[in-house]
Image (cartoon, rainbow, N blue to C red):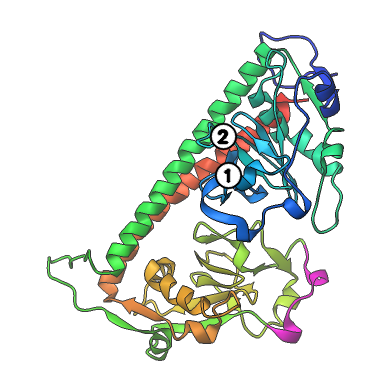
Amino acid sequence: MATPKLRFKEFKGEWLQADIQALVDEKIIDKPMDGNHGEIHPTSADYVDDGIPFVMATDVIDGKVHLDKSKKIKKSQADGLRKGFSVGGDILLTHKATIGNVAKVPELKTPYIMLTPQVTYYRVLNKAKLIPDFIKSTFEAPIFQNELLALCTGATRLYIGISEQRKLPFSYPSKEEQTKVAAFLSAVDEKISQLTQKYQLLSQYKQGMMQKLFSQQIRFKADDGSEFGEWEENVIQYFMDKNYIIDQMDGNHGELYPKSEEFSEKGIPYIGATDFSNGQVNFLSTKKLPIERALKFKKGIAKDGDILFAHNATVGPVALLKTDLEFVILSTTATYYRCNPQKLKNIYLKSILESDYFKKQYVGIMSQSTRNQVPITTQRKLKLLVPSLEEQTKIANFLSAIDQKIEVVSQQIEQAKTWKKGLLQQMFV
């Protein structure tokens, strides 16, 4: 029966059931279209600083088209292309490699945007029958996403072409009900957008304050009002030799590197660079190793309170390890730093490893190499700024308070997204 589980009480009756092809045949929507393939497909040599946005699947994120981040091509070149001309109000659906991301094209400053072959646009012709925002919400619904994935082909790079997309089922009610459903979900999207903006502003504020703190533009004073002494600047190896950092190590290479078949559903977390999120370890995403296997490792054995630094492939994220376990295991993509609490506060170390002061050093080194990594030996040559323990504590407490606010907003965003997902599960058929 084509009726949703969750519905506004003033609406009754079944929804109309069709597929994308039927909507095209009835001229409710235009023929779905993606970008240009083959010889006329723009290449990196065609990109310019200002021009027509050339939208890839990676530009369609969190329900928005990020035109500010997209590549650009000259209008003269875009005008000569055959297809993929998308305009404001179109609904975009990513269909290659990145599958199922959805967004509505905003009001444009250019006559149109160009799509790559990774993205399809859907354009409503008969708005008395169907509204664009309802298409967007339908495409986001789990029931549609599952149908989309079921029709995909490809083992390593999923793909669903235009002809297969036309087979996708699509159910819809009256325009009045569509409008109410879409308006309600748009309000949820707006709430998520506001929270996301708040998160970004807090993150920018933290980065700005770290810049001022670690450049010593801003200095704290002692509790008695006196000035703190000079900061010590030296390479990490120096602070290891002086027992500020009592251990630093990454994961096991070679024969001890675990094979995919050794992982299990339960066990000791095996943490890689991609498991860092918002300054913490996302244990839901980590792989697990049986305890007897984990005990065989000779290094990369991290403990509660260690500071983790992602140094391979994904470079730069930092996390404070919080765990009730006796130890966890790091992959070869992450380094742990263990502080001597009598000389170096772990929260202070986390903050300076996150700062532009530290980032500029390893980015400068990576720019001279073809490999996206900062190995242990290189890390030990990078510099740290270390004030007195009392000033470290004041800096750490100040930045931790900002981190707590960021974490609260991050949790609110996740809760809102979970709520929206539940609504989408029940409001569509």
Residue lying at 72% horizontally and 66% vertically, measured from the top left: 288
The reply to whether callout 2 and callout 1 are in contact (CB within 8 Å) is: yes
* Residue 189 seen in the current view: yes
Query: At which x and y percent is residue 383?
Result: 38, 81
Q: Amino acid at mark 2?
A: Pro
Above or below residue 360? Residue 205 is above
The part of the image, by quadrant, that contains residue 263 is bottom right
Query: At which x and y percent is residue 410?
Result: 50, 47
- Disc 1 crowd, CA 10 A, few/some/many (<14, 14-19, 20+): some
- Dot label at residue 75: 1
* 342 displayed left or right of 31: left
Q: Nearer the viewer, residue 235 or 255?
A: 235
Above or below residue 380? Residue 181 is above
Query: At which x and y percent is residue 227?
Result: 14, 71
* 302 displayed left or right of 167: left
Residue lying at 62% horizontally and 61% vertically, measured from the top left: 45
